[in-house]
Each structure stands twice: as structure tokens, then as C-alpha cells.
Image: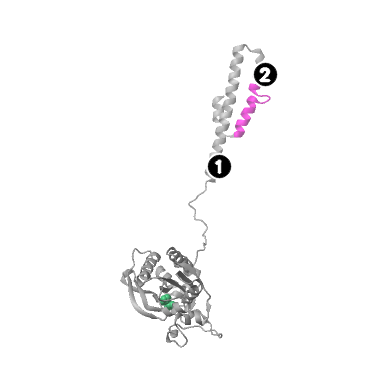
Amino acid sequence: MDDQIKNIKTLEELQSLYTSVFGKNGTMTARLRDMKNLDNDARAALNAENVLLRELFKTRQAEIENAILMDNLAKQKLDVSLNPVPENRGTLHPLTQSLSEISAILESFGYTRWTGPELEDDWHNFTALNTPAHHPARDMQDTFFLENGNVLRTQTSAIQIRAMESDGVPIKMFGIGSTYRKEMDATHSPMFGQIEGLYVDKGVTMSDLIADVRMFLSRFFEMDDVELRIRPSYFPFTDPSIEIDMKWHGGKWLEVMGAGMVHPNVLRNCGINPDQYQGFAFGFGWDRLAMLKYGLDDIREFYNGDVRWLKNAGF
Ligand code: PHE
């Protein structure tokens, strides 16, 4: 009987054998019924046999159930090596990403972020920036004029005027936003993003300017140190004015920003005494910096909104 139970493979067979032993007409049932005719020893032996047999059935049942379970698990196993359905994931636009990186770096240097209107009046875009009507420097920027004499902001320098007018000095801020000029080629877009840094306090010098710019560029381009080249330049709102170049991979010099010490007239126009306060300002196209960082040749690619291009460029 023991071997018979152990050789059974299915629960159904086990059940029918069990019934033939312990069922109403089962062999064991019959023997138990006649137990009263047995002597004590035989009774004890029968009881023991009864208990053992039930145990054997139970054990075999558990074994068969376990085998069925293992079998099902093997059949239902997930094949995780199968290729998943392709997934189209959205990401932030590279310009948005670099914008937040730039902001985070400048904020960590203590600059406060400002924005301003894209439609500017003549005062904030030109006159307060020491560029009065008929000043030849107005031609440096091909301006979009509105009929009422306002302009599409040509430079974020307008924001530094608004910041000084509103908060006075000392001030450490950066202005950020879109600017507009009538120009369009591979490195110029009629709308582009500018960032402008301004720090005015007592005793601010040109070396403070260069230190901040150097730290900023090395953080943004993730370079241990950056080599800068300072060239004299001209902007009506800074004096002296400089152009800052940066040594790029392969030893090539790249022009990265305009900068200078804030012109005393600009401070005066904002009600600040230039005999007490000095400051520096720097300005650059943030899409141009992003273009360098990501190794792009054509700035207009950023604005086409072509998802295939964004994907191929690795964004
Ligand atoms: N506004 C200048 C430009 O658009 C850049 C600049 C900003 C230069 C601040 C000097 C100081 O070209």
C-alpha cells in the first residue's frame, strides 16, 4: 500500500484510492468497524496502521500539489529578456535645461534672478543705458521698432536699469529673457536668449568681474579651469568695455560675452552716485553658450521644434 500511494501521480487517482480505503465502503473503514472483535494488541496495531496510512495520503497529496505549483510557476515564468514596447519619453528642451543650469550657477554666486518686459520703452532699452537718441551705437543693434516708439527689447541690459530703479544699491542680480534683433544666419536668430549679470557695490572692480565670469564658465562647461582672453571693446553703457574670449577644446578662442564696468552715466540715470558706487555688468546669449556646450553648428536648430532633430542630437 505504501508504494502504491507513493507512485500515484495525480490528485484524482489519489482521491479514488483514498476513497477505496477510507470511504464508506473502504477497506480500512470496514476493518475499523470490526475492531471490537480484535484483542488489545491487534487493536493497537490497527490504530497505528490507520494513523500511518492517513499520514501517507496527506504527505503524497502535499507532494503532488507542490509539483503542480512548481509546474505552473515554470510555465508562467516571465521572460524579462524580451524587448519592451518602444517608449517615447519627453525631455526638457536643451535651451530650458541650460537656462536652469545657468540660473542655478549664478544664484549660487549670490545673484538674484530678474525678468522684465520684452516690449520695452526707449528709456530702458537705450537712453538710460547711456545711448541717447541719435547716438551712433544705436545702430549696433538692428532694432524692431513699434509704431508708438517702443521696441522689442534688443538686450537684457534693459532689465538691469529696471532692477536698479526699483531696488537701488548695493545690488547683485541677473536678468534673463528673450531679446530681438533683425538678423538671421547660422549663428544669429532674430529672437535669442540673453542673460545679463550686474553687481554694483562700494569698491567693485574689474577683477571681481573676471573672477565671477571665470568661475561661471568653468562650472557651466564643466572644465577644471578656463583660460580667458580679454579684449578691449565698446558698449555705451560700460567703461571700460571688454569682450571676453574663452579657450575652447583644441586651443580655439571663442568669443563668449561682452562686459565692462558700469558707465557712471548709467548709475546716475538710476539715481546712484558713481563717486560712491562702482559695478560691473556682463551679457551673453545663453543659446549661444548652449550651442557651444552641445556642439551645434546652427543656432536655428534650437527653435525649429523638430523632435527628430532633438532625438538625433541626443536630447
Ligand atoms: N548688451 C550687450 C549686447 O547685447 C552685452 C553687454 C552686457 C555688454 C553687459 C556689456 C555689459 O551685446
Instruction: Report which residue position mark 1 lands on.
Output: 72
The outermost residue toward the top is 39
**Residue at the image point whose x is 54% and y is 45% from the top:** 76
Q: Is residue 28 left or right of residue 279?
A: right
At 54% across and 29% down in the image, what residue appears? 6
**Horizontal and vertical percent position of residue 85:** 52, 58
Q: Mark 2 vs mark 1: which is more N-terminal?
A: 2
Q: Is residue 9 above or below residue 34?
A: below
Identify the magenta region: 11-32
Ligand 1 picture quarter? bottom left
User: Does mark 2 have its CB less than 8 Å from ligand 1?
Assistant: no
Q: Which mark is residue 39?
A: none
Left or right, 74 with respect to 188, comes to right
Residue marked by disc 2: 33
Residue 233 can be seen in this image:
yes
Question: Dot 2: within a 10 Å radius of its alpha carbon, few (fewer than 14), some, or many (20 or more) residues?
Answer: few
Going by the numbered disc 1, the residue's amino acid type is: Asn
Image quadrant containing the N terminus: top right
Mark 2–mark 1 Cα distance, whole angstroms, equals 42 Å
User: For the residue marked with disc 2, what is the amino acid?
Assistant: Arg
Q: Position of residue 99 (x, y in %)?
A: 47, 68
Q: Is residue 235 one of those drawn in magenta? A: no
